[in-house]
Amino acid sequence: MQEASQRRRREGISGPGGGAALCGALLLYAAACSGSQVSPSLNAPTDSTRAVVEIAQFRDARALAADPAGWLYVVDAAESTVSVLSATGEVIDTYGGPGTGEYSLLDPADVDPTNGLDLFVADMGNGRIQRFSRDGEFIESVAVPVGDPGAALGRDVPEGRPLAVAVGPGGALYAAEGERGVVLRWESDRRLSRLLGLPEDGGGALIEPVDIAVSGEGTVFVADSRRNAVLVYDGLGTFRRAISGRASGGVRAVALAPSAEGERLLIVGPRAIAVHEASGGLVDVILPAVSEDLVGAAVANGELYVLTRTWLVRVE
């Protein structure tokens, strides 16, 4: 077991501070706030792009998420950590550190803070999902097998590569497995019960799943970069529809976010975020003024944040 100082560092911040007030009627599409400054290390906005404000810098960021309290979570593969930040970029906690034991991570790929009480991390290099409490205590480790149909029948299969993680209603756990290109589901007792996106699923077959989001009703949204679409499955795992990634110029990540008009689906492309209704209708396309490709997006405290490999910024 690793020392507590390695697995988690507290910086003395007691609550989510610094969240800016919403500037417009919709949570996602506020008009630019006055008095903001654009970092000189990022692109200046043009007529087609939105100004951004630098929040934090990383070496090799892989994923971004937010919890209901407004904390931001960034996976940094270069450090093998998950950083927890306030809305203004202050570091609250750091989970992980390189290694193979409990509390350690190796090439982490994704994070889901669920309700803010538990933290699930796709520990890709160790072939597992790790679960921590809000206080940084280790809770469980779930081995991720290669996405083979035999895995659901309990056969021994090789270790897989969890690229993304999401938690659904009732504690169901989902992981995108990179070797076979499918999504695995475990029940709350961690019984592996279902595989989504197999070839026999026809139009719902996955090719290269890269991210997952699950709604409160159990609808599963899977970002597939090769299909350039987000595939939608119901709570039983039945394929329902595909939402094109054309508006975002590609599919790198997917997220769900609240808005004044109901839950929105964020499809993250290399340089744009396409905002859809949960049913699939396109609402808006947001072009942040950044010079690097995007890897993730999240809404916290009514503000839109986007992540590149080295920058976390707030979109104005």
Image (cartoon, helix red, strand yellow):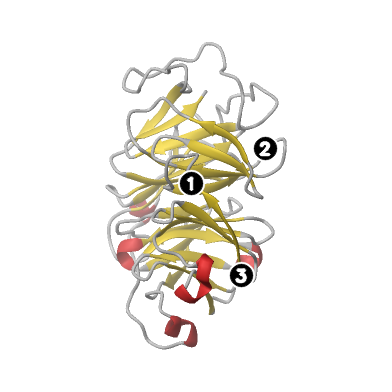
Nearer the observer: mark 2 or 1; the answer is 1
Answer whether residue 15 is visible to the viewer in this image: no
Nearer the observer: mark 3 or 2; the answer is 3
Q: Position of residue 15 (x, y in %)?
A: 57, 36
Disc 3 residue crowd, few under 14, some 14–19, many 20+, Cα 10 Å:
some
> Disc 2 or 1, which lies upstream in sequence?
1
- State whether residue 41 is above or below residue 146: above
Name the side, left or right, on which 5 lies relative to 117. left
Disc 1 residue crowd, few under 14, some 14–19, many 20+, Cα 10 Å:
many
Disc 2 secondary structure class = loop
Q: Which mark is residue 259?
A: 2
Q: Amino acid at mark 1?
A: Gly
Q: Which residue is mark 3?
A: 238
Disc 1 secondary structure class = loop
Q: Which residue is mark 1?
A: 245
Answer whether residue 232 is visible to the viewer in this image: yes
